[in-house]
Amino acid sequence: MKYKDLWQSSKVLLIPSEEIDQKVTGYIIGNLLKHKEVSTFDELYNNPFSNYKHLADQYGKEFVNDLIYQVININENSEGEVDLNVSEAEASKPSAEAG
């Protein structure tokens, strides 16, 4: 089975700021909680399909939990798209670090 057949498509997104980067990170590491695959941070910590344990050990659980809490209630449409409160103009700006 080809990768594209399994995952259907890929998308590259520009992350224009540290604030948006933290929201994306919180969304990714909190995804199993959001979709009720786990029900506690302890379950998330011990889940082999999450990098929460690695980040919590590296940066501390309080910091990582705060990242998740920033986005755990984000509205998501049926296509899995979330509103990160970024305007179209801001999202299309080249990053200063991209050089």
Image (cartoon, helix red, strand yellow):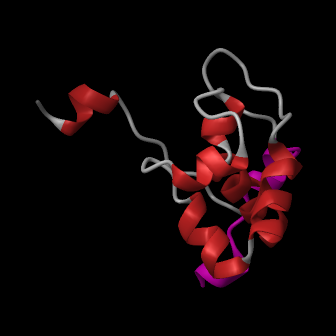
Q: Is residue 82 left or right of residue 28?
A: right
Asked whether 74 or 18 is in front, the reply is 74
Q: How many marks?
A: 0
Q: Whole-percent x and y of residue 22?
A: 76, 63
Asked whether 54 or 99 is in front, the reply is 54
Residue 86 visible in the current orientation: no
Asked whether 83 or 26 is in front, the reply is 26
Question: Vertical placement of 59 versus 33: above or below?
Answer: below
Q: Whole-percent x and y of residue 6?
A: 26, 28
In the image as oriented, which residue stretches furthest toward the top? 78
Q: Quadrant of the C terminus?
A: bottom right
Q: Is residue 87 left or right of residue 76?
A: right
Q: Is residue 68 left or right of residue 12?
A: right
Q: Whole-percent x and y of residue 51?
A: 52, 59
Identify the residue shown where x is 22% and y is 26%: 5
Magenta stretch: residue 2 in it?
Answer: no
Q: Quadrant of the N terminus?
A: top left
Q: Quadrant of residue 32?
A: top right
Q: Quadrant of residue 15?
A: bottom right
Asked whether 93 or 68 is in front, the reply is 68
Identify the residue shown where x is 41% and y is 40%: 10
Identify the residue shown where x is 62% and y is 26%: 80
For the record, the magenta segment spans: 84-99
Q: Whole-percent x and y of residue 55?
A: 61, 70
Magenta stretch: residue 96 in it?
Answer: yes
Residue 48 visible in the current orientation: yes
Question: Vertical placement of 26 versus 62: above or below?
Answer: above
Identify the residue shown where x is 71% and y is 41%: 40
